[in-house]
Image (cartoon, grey):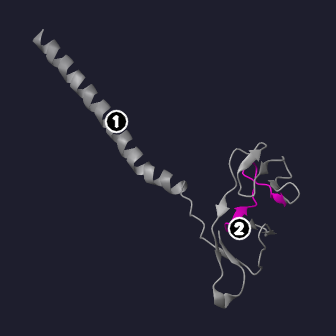
């Protein structure tokens, strides 16, 4: 009877060690694969760009560029992205309605880029704008 109990203990111990070794190998494999998975998902952020607009905009006016629309009012100057947040179509400013409209699915935004209606769920991104230095001429610098 004693021999039977010792054999049972040895079997349980061996099984425990085998399972422990299997879990240890699995943990080591995960530890090795984690950096590789992180590397594959890594994206290099875009470098910031400065675009100079050599144009003086009147109060209440706007200027369209391929990547942004530049607005000016009494409070200041700002730029809004021309890429719709719904599917990436190029939006344009409707001067009569004072709204930015997407021609693809008719998402509508205010001149500040705030969503008014349509299938887009997010507001348009805004870009910071500074006035050009005195030596550079009249205009604005948009920081994308």
Spot the residue most to the front. 74
Q: Give the mark nearer the N terminus: 2 vs 1.
A: 1
Label 2 to label 1, Cα distance in Å? 67 Å
**Residue found at x 77% / y 42%:** 119
Decide whether the magenta segment is chiefly helix, strand or loop. loop
Give the answer, above or below, for where 26 lies relative to 128.
Answer: above
Task: Using residue 106 as the reference point, say whether residue 9 is left or right of it.
Answer: left
Check disc 1 and report the residue beneath it.
23
The answer to whether mark 2 and mark 1 are in CB contact below 8 A is: no
Q: Residue at x 71, y 87 (%)?
A: 137
Secondary structure at badge 2 equals loop
Give the quarter of the image for residue 132. Answer: bottom right
Q: Quadrant of residue 93?
A: bottom right
Q: Which residue appears at 56% of the width and 59% of the height?
A: 43
Residue holding disc 2: 74
Instruction: State yes or no: residue 91 in magenta.
Output: yes
Disc 2 residue crowd, few under 14, some 14–19, many 20+, Cα 10 Å: few
Give the percent coordinates (x, y) of residue 47. 59, 70
* Coordinates of residue 65 in the picture (x, y in percent): 78, 70
Question: Which stretch appears magenta?
Answer: 75-93
- Quadrant including the C terminus: bottom right
């Amino acid at each position: 009877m004693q021999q039977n109990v010792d054999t049972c203990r040895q079997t349980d111990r061996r099984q425990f060690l085998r399972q422990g070794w299997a879990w240890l190998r699995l943990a080591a494999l995960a530890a090795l694969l984690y950096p590789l998975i992180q590397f594959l998902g890594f994206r290099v952020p875009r470098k910031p760009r400065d675009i100079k607009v050599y144009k003086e905009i009147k109060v209440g006016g706007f200027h369209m560029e391929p990547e942004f629309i530049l607005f000016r009012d009494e409070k200041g100057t700002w730029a809004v992205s021309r890429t719709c947040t719904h599917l990436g179509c190029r939006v344009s400013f409707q001067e009569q309605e004072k709204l930015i409209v997407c021609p693809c699915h008719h998402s509508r935004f205010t001149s500040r880029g705030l969503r008014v209606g349509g299938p887009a769920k997010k507001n348009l991104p805004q870009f910071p704008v500074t006035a050009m230095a005195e030596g550079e001429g009249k205009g604005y610098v948009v920081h994308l």
